[in-house]
Amino acid sequence: MRQNTLSSLFLLGYPSSLILVERKMADLAAPGMQAPNRRIDILCYQGSTLQPLLLVECKAKSFVDKDLRQLLGYNFYIQARFIALVSPQKVLFFDVQGQTVQERLPEYNTLLV
């Protein structure tokens, strides 16, 4: 699932040089935060500022409410502006600040506004 999501991100214009895959959350946490010893699936950065832009959690099967809570918990430490849950059946994309939801991953350039 992770490889399929990466392929989709590349097609949507996300620069490969700004994407991290399967990294320790403790190494990526916002300054001053001590994150748990867990791994994130995909993290995309904003090119101009190198700030976390999109945090993606991939699930091999359908996701449930606890998976969204897990992603929100991860993002507490990462502080990306956008988050997404991705499974073979569904995509949920969230604008954390505006609290909007979409059922697809947007193009990279649209997130930079």
Image: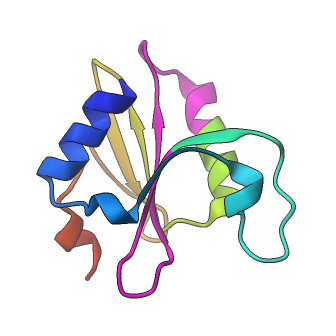
63 left or right, relative to 89: right
Measured as percent of width and height from the top left, residue 94 is found at 40, 53
12 left or right, relative to 21: left
Measured as percent of width and height from the top left, residue 28 is found at 67, 61
First to last magenta residue range: 42-69
Q: Is residue 94 above or below residue 85?
A: below
Q: Is residue 85 above or below residue 66?
A: below
Name the residue at 71% across, 71% down.
30
**Closest to the observer: 56 or 63?**
56
Name the residue at 53% across, 65% down.
80
Name the residue at 66% across, 39% down.
39
Judge whether residue 85 can be spotted in this image.
yes
Measured as percent of width and height from the top left, residue 15 is found at 26, 63
In the image, is residue 68 part of the stretch drawn in magenta?
yes
Q: Residue furthest bottom?
A: 48
Name the residue at 15% across, 54% down.
12
Q: Residue furthest top?
A: 61
Image quadrant in which you'd find residue 40: top right
Measured as percent of width and height from the top left, residue 109 is found at 18, 72
Judge whether residue 104 can be spotted in this image.
no
Q: Residue furthest front?
A: 17
**Closest to the observer: 35 or 89?**
35
